[in-house]
Image (cartoon, helix red, strand yellow):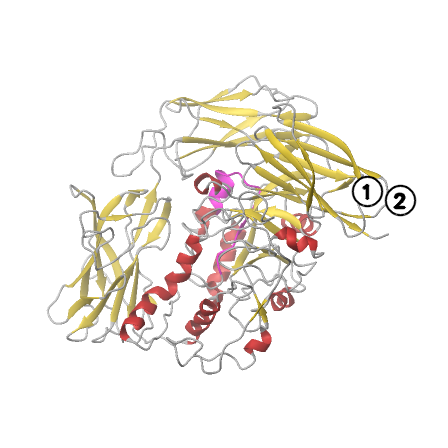
Amino acid sequence: MSGHRSRRAPLSTGRELHICRNVASSLQRCVLLVLVLCLGCDQEGPPVTDEHVSISDETPILPGVPWFELPSDWFEQHPLVSPNAKLESHWMAMAEKLMPLHAGDGGGRAWLKSVRSIPLRELEWSHEPPANERAPRQKRPALAVGSRHQFEIIFEVGPEGIQDGGLLFLSAEAFWEWSEAQAARPTADGFTTARLLSNGAALLPLNVGAGFEVRGGDLLPGERIEFIYGAGETGARVDRYAERNAEILIAVDADGDGMRGWIDDAPRLDIIARSGSRLVAFGPAEIAPDQPFEISVSITDTLGNRAAWPNKVRESGSPDDSGAGAEFELVVLDHSTLGLQQSKTSFVPSASIGLPWLVQCHPSPGNGTLRLQMRGRGVLEGLVSDLPPIVVRESDARLVWGDLHGHTALSDGTGTPEDYLAYARDVARLDVIALTDHDHWGPRPLDDDPVAVSELFEIIDDAERSDRFVTLPGYEWTNWIHGHRHVLYFDEADDETASRKIFSALDPATDRPDELWSALRGRRALTFAHHSAGEPVAVNWAYAPDPELEPITEIASVHGQSESAYVKGAVRGGIPGYFVLDTLKQGYRFGFIGSGDSHDGHPGLAHIAAGQGGLAGIFTPKLDRANILSALRKRQTFATNGIRPWLEVSIDGSHMGQTIVAPEHQGSQLLRIRYEATAPLERIELVRSGRVATVLIPEEDGLSLTLEREIPSLAAGDFHYVRFVERGGGMAWSSPIYVDPR
């Protein structure tokens, strides 16, 4: 990936506001996203209403940026917006794009000189590049997740210098429990100091964050500053999620005008998991009879970080990867209707960390369901993983699992794109994965760097494995006035006709949903809405979803469920009238998917740390981009909140997602359900045109359900889907079956 693009911070009228906006402009939106990860909201409400935008001519659009003006036709272009639209966030982001940087903004380089553990004791790690080395190779310490340290950082002024009155800022990554860098409270976490390593000027701490103002003279190229992040007794806490190449950000505003840039060559470190405490094992969701298959086995810590052997992490955080004394045992459970042909059920892994262990299996003849359990032995004693059901049958289309929405450190997530994709393939054992970092959010906005986008999409393309692992380039269209959507591309990497780019939500040409769809017309692409009813901004359904480009919608994620305000676990801040069920009542037609919205580097397993997540079940005849696109367009999908059941729903032989014709005469229709659960079912709810028509309570604790039931015939305009609720909180939703008039 290319280096940082500079992040611009806006001007302000007053000095204090100038500083506050400078520090907070990039982080305020990040904090907003973190807040919406909180769960729960139970509401119900009226039909969709849209908010009209109005503002007095005398009112400054942005009081802190008085020069900023909207295009003259902006309000004509956006007469209706979401009811909780973040107008200031949208306009501030527009203003940032217009601000030029001083030549010295974002100049300089920095490196970690030392890292000490807290409480202070032995020197854990140190690095001092040669004095004559212009660009020291960054060596990276390895620190355990959530550990506390004191970081000594050396910053060297860039070739343009820093003027008297210039500003410097230090910031840890804004997410996942890094201690906030601050210069005001010596006894609090993240206390940060700064001093010049030469005579002359002084550095005065600001009253916001870890910001410092140069006073008493200019800083010349090559002068050095020592930052200590975590200078107080409690030090600074690192991320709770493991990641390579984590960055301590440093920004330079060389002339003090309120516009800053992040330096490219910043301190970096690796954060690694603590002792492994969880066994994670997955097989395929569906196979043909007599088809050999593989089971992947990994070890994670309690938060889902890929981990080392239990009790084998040194105090410094370095793993012991010897793997001595480890063994797995594969067990066929009582609820299984099929067995395995092989006699060998015990396995010794060939590696201890970094790769999944693959176990070769072969089912016994016939159709049915395999239910397996992987048990640890030796140093892994006590670790157990129940595999999701594996359905064995002849079929034209088989079930595969996908997570179509997640983030890395390129925007507001954790880790590198390479590690995100590897986790999806090796640990979560997904069949389909999309990486959808934000278009204009975070320290590396994609929408102003087509070279970085090209490099990112190449990484995603290179991670694909034929017939095994489908990767999808994409991004999150982060629109603060009309709601967030995801854009996915399905071109093959070697397709010369592929045309994939970022259509920014800040670009006046593509800042409305209809304009986005117009830009995507003719491309092998699709979109889907995210947290449609809740925070930070609801989807503006006044723009009817394009039936070709938006055939699916996200119904569950780490934010909660977006189906209905009536259902447990609704997204935080859910607005009545904006849930997916409300849109179905208006006549919109979608297939249902779930997405993790992983920000922790754990696509496919976001629910481990968040308590809830989302996955998409997709039925496809072949595992490649073309067939996945076709399946999504045909709505051959279902959604879950992170669990991996197998389900099939049909009415008179027509499957979920399909459209049927209303019967000629009123009578009954045959509903068929097959459900292979991950835990005993608590209830099954038949949802007919927005109302729960029937609630079925299973009489037994079995994990396999096959049901046929006569239901009153559906009329034109009706839709029907099934909601499954398992004990323990697992949920799944079949895509609706829709009814056209005769």
Q: Is residue 426 magenta?
A: yes
Label 1 CA crowd tier, 10 Å (few <14, some 14–19, many 20+): some
Q: Please name the amino acid that badge 1 sits on.
A: Ser
Does the stretch in magenta take in 632?
A: no
- Spot occupied by residue 225 in the image (x, y as percentages of width and height): 19, 63
Is residue 458 visible to the viewer in this orientation of the structure? yes
Residue under circle 2?
665
Q: Position of residue 342 (x, y in %)?
A: 58, 19
Residue to which mark 1 is pinned: 713
Q: Secondary structure at mark 2?
A: loop
Find the magenta span and give its range. 421-438
Classify residue 206 by image quadrant. Answer: bottom left
Asked if disc 1 and disc 2 are in contact, CB closer than 8 Å, the reply is: yes
Rendered location of residue 593, percent (x, y): 61, 47
Comparing 416 with 56, the one in front is 56
Residue 417 is left or right of residue 672, and the answer is: left
* Residue 343 numbered tag: none
- Three-letter code, disc 2: His
Identified at 53% across, 55% down, the residue is: 534
